[in-house]
Image (tube, rainbow, N blue to C red):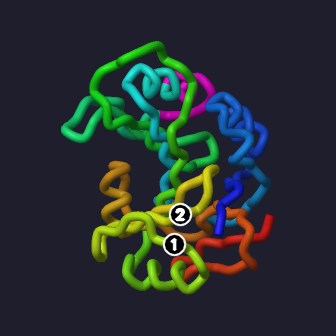
């Protein structure tokens, strides 16, 4: 089963579309109008995985110039280099690389676009997705799971509280997730309320 694209829901699709275009993501991420109530953490993050620090800086700069705000400033850590932003539609974005050194110019190339769903029970959600035809590519017990979902968007599951902590936000949140996942499977809603539709 492949993920073809993601639709982020917002009361201001025009601003969100400009943000996605500035990141070069408008082929895989769209914005659509909604007034569905939501507060706090929406239960997911989007990650741009790139090859080196200067590319992180280029994407973060473009995001901030187009309505993004800093949640966690870009910094070097044991794991690499990166930071967390919030888009104008409220979605949380992590931009990161495992590399600590630049080996070339800052090309605008994304290695992976990853949708991380924060779930209440990783084991149960993993089984749900297995039952819906997804194939596991990496798994760390009850903590983290990655699935094979095609070349456009990768899907991973993480505990909700752990994902919020990684993004440096409170795990509290209510209402709509404000994201719809589009793929080649029949429509369904997962145990944590994330909605999938057929392309």
Mark 1 element type: strand
Q: Which one is in front, 117 or 141?
A: 141
Measuring from the top left, give residue 66's x and y in whole percent: 63, 27
Q: Which one is in front, 1 or 58?
A: 1
Q: Are marks 1 and 2 in contact (CB under 8 Å)?
A: yes
Q: Which mark is residue 97?
A: none
| Residue 172 makes an appearance in the image | no
Which residue is denoted by mark 2 in the rendering?
A: 148
At 50% from the left and 21% from the top, the residue drawn is 58
Measuring from the top left, give residue 144's x and y in whole percent: 35, 67
Measuring from the top left, give residue 142's x and y in whole percent: 30, 76
Crowding near the residue tagged with mark 1, few <14, some 14–19, many ≥20 C-alpha atoms within 10 Å: some
Q: Which one is in front, 173 or 156?
A: 156
At 45% from the left and 70% from the top, the residue drawn is 136
Crowding near the residue tagged with mark 2, few <14, some 14–19, many ≥20 C-alpha atoms within 10 Å: some
Quadrant housing the C terminus: bottom right
Measured along the vertical axis of the image, is residue 179 above or below residue 80? Answer: below
- Quarter of the rendering containing residue 36: bottom right
Measured along the vertical axis of the image, is residue 132 above or below residue 31? Answer: below
First to last magenta residue range: 61-69
At 76% from the left and 59% from the top, the residue drawn is 34
Q: Is residue 158 magenta?
A: no
Relative horizontal placement of residue 99, taking residue 126 as reference (left or right): left
| Residue 124 makes an appearance in the image | yes
Q: In 3D space, how far apart are the residues under numbered discs 1 and 2 (Cα atoms)?
A: 6 Å
Which residue is denoted by mark 1 in the rendering?
A: 135
């Amino acid at each position: 089963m492949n993920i073809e694209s993601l639709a982020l829901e917002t009361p201001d699709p025009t601003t969100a579309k400009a943000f996605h275009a500035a990141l070069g993501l408008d082929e895989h991420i769209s914005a659509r109008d909604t007034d569905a109530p939501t507060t706090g953490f929406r239960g997911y993050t989007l990650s741009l995985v790139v090859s080196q620090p200067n590319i992180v800086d280029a994407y973060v700069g473009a995001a901030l110039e187009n309505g993004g705000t800093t949640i966690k400033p870009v910094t070097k850590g044991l794991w690499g280099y990166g930071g967390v932003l919030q888009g104008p539609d409220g979605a949380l974005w992590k931009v990161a690389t495992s590399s600590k050194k630049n080996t070339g110019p800052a090309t605008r190339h994304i290695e992976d676009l990853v949708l991380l769903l924060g779930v209440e029970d990783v084991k149960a959600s993993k089984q749900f997705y297995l039952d819906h035809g997804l194939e596991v590519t990496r798994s760390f017990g009850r903590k983290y799971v990655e699935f094979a979902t095609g070349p456009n968007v990768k899907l991973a599951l993480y505990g909700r509280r752990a994902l919020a902590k990684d993004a440096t936000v409170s795990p509290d949140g209510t209402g709509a997730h404000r994201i719809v996942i589009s793929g080649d499977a029949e429509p369904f809603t997962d145990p944590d309320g994330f909605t999938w539709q057929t392309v």
